[in-house]
Image (cartoon, rainbow, N blue to C red):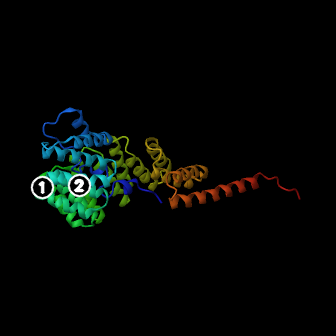
Amino acid sequence: MSARYSDRLRWPFASACLAFLVGAAPFAAHAQAGQGWAACSGQAPDAAIDACSKLIASFGPKETAHNKAAAFYNRANAYVAKGDYERAFPDFAKALELEPKSASMLSARAAAYRGQGDYKSAVKDLDAAIKRDPKNADIFISRGAARYGLHDFDGAIADFGEALKFNPTYGPAFTARAKVYMQERKEEKALADFAEAVKYDKTAAPYLSRGDLYLEIKDADRAIADFTEGLKREPNSVVAFVDRGSAWRSKGELDKAIADYDAALKIDPKLVPALYNRASIWRMKKEFPRAKEDYEAILKLRPDFPEAKKGLEEVDRLISWQAKNAAKAAAPTAKP
């Protein structure tokens, strides 16, 4: 069995493939000045949290509601960046108390809900955001992703289509809709959307996603071509290397598959899908000690990985069997 990196990281709508989640941008403050505001609206989460907290503590009764909202909002986004949702949601709530009509804040909180898998709450916030900003393609994209999380595929497709009405050349919207069509096994519609996506989206995302589709329909050559094109645009994409390795493997090109897994592991030595797939190929090539090394590396990273445990047990038996056969072969033959 081959592990697909894309299954874990890009599906559904969870990763760089759809890097259009709204609400993560910093919120500007009125009369913004000084290093405090610069850090509060910066991209370093810990520094932003510290700076925003100091600003919030310093606010007097004459501070504008907008500036207060900006500080709470930016701190909330910094908490989200750290995965600290428990602290993020109270800050979003405070920011929205101060600026209840902000579509950006509602969208940001919705993205946080999605990060926790609370798609119902995300849709509720995005419904409200759309009422406040009804022509914002990004908000429809986000709601479509949340609806997908609820398995409301028709709703997701409708939202991605609505986004394309406002921005007909928005490549990520075509990719998003194509991925829903993939889930519904509507390959022709998915391929039509991917064809549009690659026209307008200059990132690797549409090629990597279309490569996934070609893998699913067992068209390895086209999958390899798309993953290769994706690597031209994003040379350090472990997603592309791992999934292209799977395509090479499906063609029986085991050495090329190993080369791609090696390339992925050079970028990220702790990449479990690459280790697992490479281990399975070492077994196919009867290079059991190498497979053992990869399984052991996986279990150091993920001790609860049952397939790796089973694989290690099997290669240990095979190594023992090989050793016994080698010993028998080396033993002198008794003379009659």
Residue lying at the far front in this picture: please name it.
Answer: 61
Q: Residue at x 16, y 61 (%)?
A: 127
- Residue 222 % position (x, y): 34, 52
Q: Is residue 151 left or right of residue 240?
A: left
Of circles 2 and 1, the one toward us is: 2
Q: Which mark is residue 140?
A: none
Q: The disc labelled 2 sits on which kind of residue? A: Arg
The reply to whether residue 138 is in sight is no
Neighbours of disc 2 within 10 Å: few (<14), some (14-19), many (20+): many
The correct choice, above or below, for 235 with respect to 290 in the image is above
Work out whether residue 172 or residue 118 is closer to the camera in this orientation and state it. Answer: 118
The correct choice, above or below, for 41 with respect to 164 in the image is above
- Residue 78 % position (x, y): 29, 46
Q: Secondary structure at mark 1?
A: helix
Q: Which residue is mark 1?
A: 165
Work out whether residue 149 or residue 125 is closer to the camera in this orientation and state it. Answer: 125
Q: Secondary structure at mark 2?
A: helix
